[in-house]
Amino acid sequence: MSAGEMPDRDAAAPPRPGLRLPGLRTVLGALGGTLLMAMMALTVCDVIGRYLFNSPVAGAAELTEILLAAVIFLGLGAVSLEEAHVTVDLATDRMPAAVQPLRQALTGLAAGAVLAVVAWRIWIYAAQIGGYGGSTSTLGLPLAPLGYFCALACLAGALLTAGVPLARLLRSWRNEE
């Protein structure tokens, strides 16, 4: 290894079996990819229309913002399912291997609780937006459905964030018996 190179800890780490939900992985990946492709196609059409034909796509910025919000919150479930969150392990990687599943489960439960609170607050905010009929300025698209979608996706992310490491911990306890 040359100077400045970091060792790849994941290459040497044993696989971490969490929840086995291949269908959910496929659905989240397909939906996320479809939304990203739609956002990319919209941006390409808007740029071509704007610079070649002097006619941008009406409401392209609004649609891009809506698609971006949907991709981010949909991606939260995918990241949670794969346990691919950004982490800082200054002290935790020095803990004994035997306590890692318990630490990960407790961390997952805490993070899941925070995400559940965020989902609850987004739901309340969506209800407020729906109450006064909030919509986008150019296209007049209602914003409440997007808020409800984001809240439900955040709740799914919360459940997966808490459930995946908890399932692994329970499985490791069953295997020890």
Image (tube, helix red, strand yellow):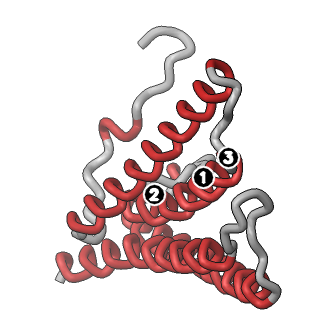
Residue 98: percent from left, percent from top: 37, 65
Residue type indicated by callout 2: Val
Residue 126: percent from left, percent from top: 71, 81
Mark 2 or 1, nearer chain start: 1
Is 74 situated above or below 64? Answer: below
- Quadrant in which residue 42 is drawn: top right
Q: Which residue is mark 2?
A: 79
The mark lying in front, picked from 3 and 1, is 3
Q: Please indicate whether residue 40 sits to the left or right of residue 151 in the image.
A: left
- Badge 1 local density, few (<14 within 10 Å), some, or many (20+)? some
* Residue at the image position 41 percent from the left and 60 percent from the top: 78
The mark lying in front, picked from 2 and 3, is 3
Is 156 situated above or below 22? Answer: below
What is the distance, in whole Å, between disc 2 and disc 3 at their CAs? 33 Å
The mark lying in front, picked from 2 and 1, is 1
User: Dot 1: what SS?
Assistant: helix
Is 74 situated above or below 15? Answer: below
Q: Which residue is mark 3?
A: 58
Residue 3: percent from left, percent from top: 53, 10
Q: Which residue is mark 1?
A: 68
- Badge 2 local density, few (<14 within 10 Å), some, or many (20+)? some
* Residue at the image position 61 percent from the left and 29 percent from the top: 49
* Residue at the image position 50 percent from the left and 38 percent from the top: 40
Q: State if disc 3 and disc 2 touch (CB < 8 Å).
A: no
- Quadrant in which residue 99 is drawn: bottom left
- Badge 3 local density, few (<14 within 10 Å), some, or many (20+)? few
